[in-house]
Amino acid sequence: MQKRIYLASQSPRRLELLRQIGVDAMVLPLRQQGGRADVDETPVNSEKAVDYVTRVARMKVEAGAMAVAGRRLPQMPILAADTAVAVDGMILGKPTSAEQAAAWLRGYSGKTHKVHSGVAVAWDGQVQVALSTSSVRFRELSEDEIAAYVMSREPMDKAGGYGIQGRAAVFIEHIAGSYSGVMGLPLFETATLLREVGLSVL
């Protein structure tokens, strides 16, 4: 019975979510080389958001497996995840400027968008991948609210430019799907994959 895993992510939110379900995770940073991460997260041409998040999650976990082997670390299951917001088929990553974050928030105002989270687990030479898709509806936002939220700097390191677990919670009128998936790690799918590799969850 496995007791610990590697988390191929430096996201404190994902680490916190794993702890929430009783999983002991050790952060496995993917190295930066020449200013680039081990995984290129650039979407390919015309790639659908569901394909993008599962592909990147798989690439991250495979990079994690290579890191474990290359650094001769103890063998444990490796978990990775990726989350993307999709609006009208367009994949939104993390905003590159305050202006972009504000524009995205205006686009969410009074509308519903999709949040896709892919999660992957590597163990014993195998990689398993799962997908979670949620619908999130924002209430109408005023320009003052958008400006105040952008000024908080919270949008700048979040996929899609907002954090459901942060101040943006007051904007969200309805969610259909996985709250933890919108945060960045769908716990139902994660627990299912971890149980399949023999990890005790809860």
Image (cartoon, rainbow, N blue to C red):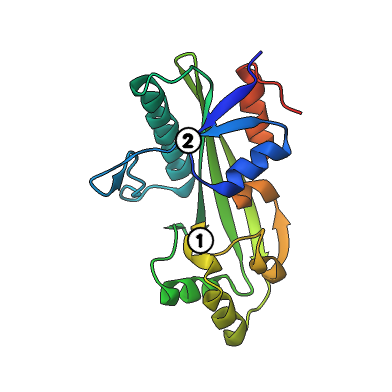
Q: Nearer the viewer, residue 12 or 148?
A: 12
Under circle 1, the secondary element is helix
Marks 2 and 1, the one that precedes in the sequence? 2
Relative to 37, residue 145 above or below: below
| Mark 1 residue type | Gly
User: Residue 144 is drawn in which quadrant?
Assistant: bottom right
The picture quadrant where one finds residue 201 is top right
Identify the residue shown where x is 64% and y is 30%: 24
Place of residue 91 in the rendered image (x, y in percent of width and height, measured from the top left): 44, 56
User: Cβ–Cβ below 8 Å for labels 2 and 1?
Assistant: no
Q: Please indicate whether residue 113 sits to the left or right of residue 48 in the image.
A: right
Q: Which mark is residue 8?
A: 2
Q: Position of residue 85 (x, y in %)?
A: 52, 56
Indicate whether 193 appears above or below 33.
above
Q: Confirm whether residue 87 shows in the render.
A: no
Image location of residue 43, percent across then percent down: 35, 49
Q: Label for residue 160?
A: 1
Looking at the image, can residue 91 be seen?
yes
The residue lying furthest to the left in this view is: 34
- Name the residue nearer the viewer: 154 or 115: 154
Give the number of the disc on residue 58.
none
Question: Is residue 169 depicted above or below 58 in this figure?
Answer: below
Seen in the image, is 34 located left or right of residue 82?
left
Give the distance between the C-alpha atoms of the residues marked 2 and 1, in whole angstroms.
Answer: 21 Å
Residue at point 61%, 26% (across, down): 193
Identity of the amino acid at label 2?
Answer: Ala
